[in-house]
Amino acid sequence: MRGRVVLSVPPLLLLCSASSAAIEPISTSIAVGMAAALTGFLASYQNIFYYFHECCRPEWIAFNRTGLEEDLGNKLFGQHLASHIIAKAVSGFMNNANPKKPLVLSLHGWTGTGKNFASVLIAENIYKKGMDSNFVHVFTAELHFPHAGQMDTYKTQLQQWIKGNVSACAHSMFIFDEMDKMHPGLIDSIKPYLDYYDKVDGVSYRKAIFIFLSNAGGESIVQTALDFWNAGRSREEIELKDVETSLALSVFNNKRSGLWHTSLIDKNLVDFFVPFLPLEYKHVVQCAKAAMSAQGLEPDAVVADKVARELLYFPKSERVFSVKGCKTIDSKWEYYA
């Protein structure tokens, strides 16, 4: 698990939010002098402390709009639509000093299309430590909620985890991976935290970000991409209106999804359903080259081509879209080098 689930506020985080210390008066003559000296020491100490230890402060949490737009445009291959939606949604939310509700994004598409990678890019452009930040929390269905018979326990734990972390830092991010494998009904337990409330039990959740990752709805997205291809139209012509309604309905009615008949959709609490299109051969080549660059190597077009050609594509006769996207590229390119 790359993020951390915190049940209570750690002592160091309490120090992050402390700005002064109570001083017990000793005598009228020396109290003012000691208070001034101690206050100066604490101010100096805290500045040093903030530098070395991650805190819920601007030194560690600062949105980089340009960085996010460039990363999405240059690193998230073949996803013009998802890149545009994410950039606009996150920028609008982070630049709003008083949002009315948390930002809720639901990322959908077949495996290997970039959903997890997109969430990483978001974290890296908000938190100085990216996915290693204490304020980024990742939940995986099969790891954290494996047993259907323990739903009541999971609901209570999930509420406590989120409340504890948001209490420690309002700008917390929660990523729910494998939503298509989550038990239906579990995610509804956090519905009050995603709604239009100033506070829930004394805690405001309006500055938090919730991201759901799911393969559910992938068939609907693929069908739209195929329809455009069969019509001789470019994938770059696909707009949100072409897929959003069918995607939302597909996810809502998928009995094998954690979002099946969820109140989050029924009450319109998901701000954007973000479609990730199936990747084509040229995008797989880009992924292979990026994998080489990540290892500090000069991208080899011949090797990238070999990797891309070995993958499975559909429809079988035309070989248009990669079955697994870029899922296995990191482990395959070295074989062909």
Image (cartoon, grey):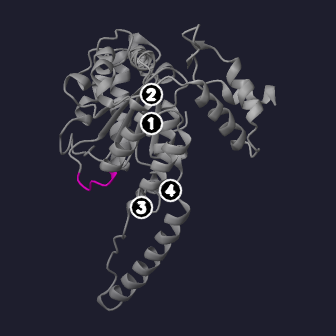
Compare residues 212 and 155 and report the one nearer the observer. Answer: 212
Provide the residue designation for mark 4.
54
Provide the secondary structure element on which disc 4 rests. loop
**Label 3 crowd (10 A; few <14 / some 14-19 / many >=20):** few
Q: Which residue occupies 45% across, 55% down?
A: 66
Q: Which residues are magenta?
A: 94-98
Name the kind of residue labelled 1 in the image.
His
Q: On the rendered image, what quadrant is the N terminus found in?
A: top right
| Residue 137 pos. (x, y %) | 46, 38
In-image side of 279 versus 209 (left or right) = right
Which picture quadrant has residue 153?
top left
> Vertically, is 11 above or below 290?
below
Compare residues 29 and 179 and report the one nearer the observer. Answer: 179
Label annotation for residue 58:
3
First along the sequence among labels 2 and 3: 3
Provide the residue designation for mark 1.
80
Name the kind of residue labelled 2 in the image.
Arg
Name the kind of residue labelled 3 in the image.
Pro
